Amino acid sequence: MNKRALFIIPGLLFISMLGLLLFGLGRDPNMVPSALVNRPLPEFSLPGLELDAAESIALITPEDLTGGISIINFWATWCPPCHIEHPYLVEISESEQGLSFIGVNYKDDLNEARLFLEEKGSPFKKIIVDLDGSLGIDFGVAGAPETFIVDSFGMIRYRHVGVINHQIWEETFEPVISSIQ
Amino acid sequence: MRTLLNTPLDGTDLNPLLQDFGLIVHPPFLYMGYVGFSVAFAFAIAALLSGRLDAAWARWTRPWTNAAWAFLSIGIALGSWWAYYELGWGGWWFWDPVENVSFMPWLVGTALIHSLAVTEKRGVFKSWTVLLAIAAFSLSLLGAFIVRSGVLTSVHAFAVDPARGMVLLTIMLIVIGSSLLLYAIRAPAVKGSASYTLTSREVLLLINNIILVVSTAAVLLGTLYPLIHEAIYGEANRVSIGPPYFNTIFVPLMGLLAFALGVGTFSRWKKTSVVYLKQQLSKVLIASLAFGIVIPVIVTSEFNISVIVAVVLAFWIVFSIAKDIFNKTSNKETFFKGLKALSLSYYGMQFAHFGMAVTILGVCLTSHYSVERDVRLAPGDSETIGNYEFIFEGVSLQQGANYQADRAVITVLRNGDEYITLEPEKRLYYATQAIQTEAGIDVGLFRDLFTALGDERGDGSWVVRIHYKPFVLWIWLGAIFMAFGGVLAITDKRYRSKKTVKQSQNESVLSGSSSSKPTMAAES
């Protein structure tokens, strides 16, 4: 390669980054696309995480989630806010026996996830393993934790970004749940 | 006289997260680092414009770069320490965009320090050094843009304004764009003057530079990836890049860097004899393997390969430093005379390298051996971790200057004897109605006991977070060593006395090597 061309590379890299930043400036980082609300669950077929068995053969599909209201919670052990919301999830899953809590272990280390749940208790009826984040992409998840309310027909009815605590549960989750019951 | 309507009785108060000493000193230190790099940048531009890319240029850039880098090291460490005790979950690094943008100038600054050494002493890598100086400052500007414009979601977005983003972007275009244009025009004419072989210090420092620049590129890519992804796949597909990506790429690169550091310590300018390197390194290698494998296995009675690799690398660095100091003092009458003859910049280098070993140990041991419990405790309940028993005595209401706090009292017993009382708080700030945790920490050289107070559970019980974090202090101790190394290098006499300057300038021109020993001997 021409030696002179080599010295232009830093400038070109900079210009392309500048273009990217200009694009970034025109968008709202806190806007959460909610294209999936009032749409059916995306198709998926993913392994489940078993606490006692090393491997799980049973695949979980959207059909496993119908027949009652589900709360689908994307979480991971590498996500500090998930550690914060976990005790509350355990508590609310005990008091709200009518709801099925489904965990999606998002881009996580499975052994750590298992240890985490063994140590702190599991609020989840089923845990879907989303190792490469593909289900996260289908759900349009921007990070963990995110929680979706799914009605008994498998329609997504609500999306919540961030930690769930007592106040958020009472003020946002309960009204949505009672409206679709 | 007029009365204004709706006069507020009180201000809105500063974000409670920021009402803390750690965070009061953290930004100025970072800022000193960013601004410091502007000096190196200015030197680089001046050198490009004048066409005088010689040893003198590199020589005068070095202390400024060291100073900026030392401030940045402390600034980043302070931020990490603040997150650890203030955010309430015991984490110390999250690969958050705003953390990353302070880390990238640091990585490039580290590369610059090493490449400046080559340019000053040997007159090679000139255009590369100039590019690094431009990059260090450019990344500082990028940092300002990302923090202030809000293009990326971050826990640090305290004051975000897209209009300001546009202004910052324009500044970047003018400053960085013009300097890279200048670089493209002037740098190709620059030629290196000296020759060197594959086992020379020049090449080892080049390896250091490649690793650091690749690390920076990986961090930059990870930080900007959400934007790239969205630009390609559209707004409905947002992604976030988590710590798994950064750890997978960054940790092995730092392992390589630590290994190269040990080899580099013994290398010499122009050419290092392979036989000599083997002879020096084999001893260091055997010693670090022995200590690095035996000690973790005995202490933890398990064979954890990633821990062993990290501990071996830490010993590898420490033993190469020790061996090098021993080599350099062995020809003097006494060890202390030998130590006295070594220059301050040499000590600076060794201190900074030692700091890296300390940080490696801290990061690795904390990550692998922390015990973290989130438990629900009623007054009188207790939780045991190892030989520490944490007794939850209860919570009382306390009044602060602009907040009220639930303060828990947790008595810690060590082997059954009373050891210390920790008082984690949960504060409610009046003006903002924001809740803020204040961890109760017992700091120790070999382990921290970390407690934080969670929510009340109605029946008088509370969620309490209890962590046992071994060696966590070492993460920041390492940064202090590094910064101290940077300061030592600046205080080297060759930057102060006029006589010294002339003398070693002549030296470096004539022989290509520089040593401040003659002056040091004369003055001491």
Image (tube, rainbow, N blue to C red):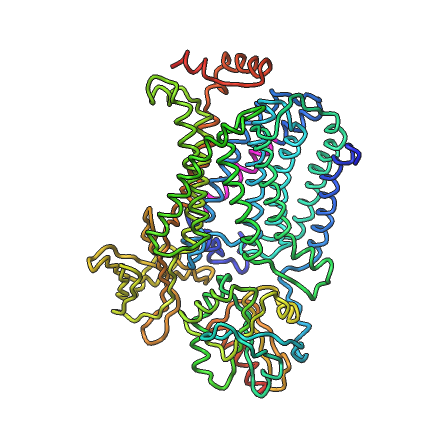
Of residues B99 and A28, the one nearer the viewer is: B99
Residue B25 in the image: state x and y as whole percent: 45, 42
Residue A35 in the image: state x and y as whole percent: 69, 72
Q: In which quarter of the image is the C terminus of chain A?
A: bottom right
Q: Looking at the magenta stretch, what is its main secondary structure? A: helix
The number of numbered badges drawn on the structure is 0
Of residues B23 and A141, the one nearer the viewer is: A141
Of residues B479 and A3, the one nearer the viewer is: A3
Q: Residue at x 53, y 60 (%)?
A: B6
Q: Quadrant of the N terminus of chain A?
A: top right
What residue span does the magenta drawing correspond to?
Answer: B23-40
Quarter where residue B256 is shown: top right
Q: Residue at x 47, y 60 (%)?
A: B432
| Magenta span contains residue B282 | no
Compared with B103, B126 (above or below) is above
Instruction: Tell me if residue B96 can be seen.
Output: no
Instruction: Tell me if residue B354 can be seen.
Output: yes
| Magenta span contains residue B25 | yes
Residue B146 in the image: state x and y as whole percent: 62, 49
Quarter where residue B411 is shown: bottom left
Residue A104 in the image: state x and y as whole percent: 55, 72
Q: In this view, does B475 lie to the left or right of A133?
A: left
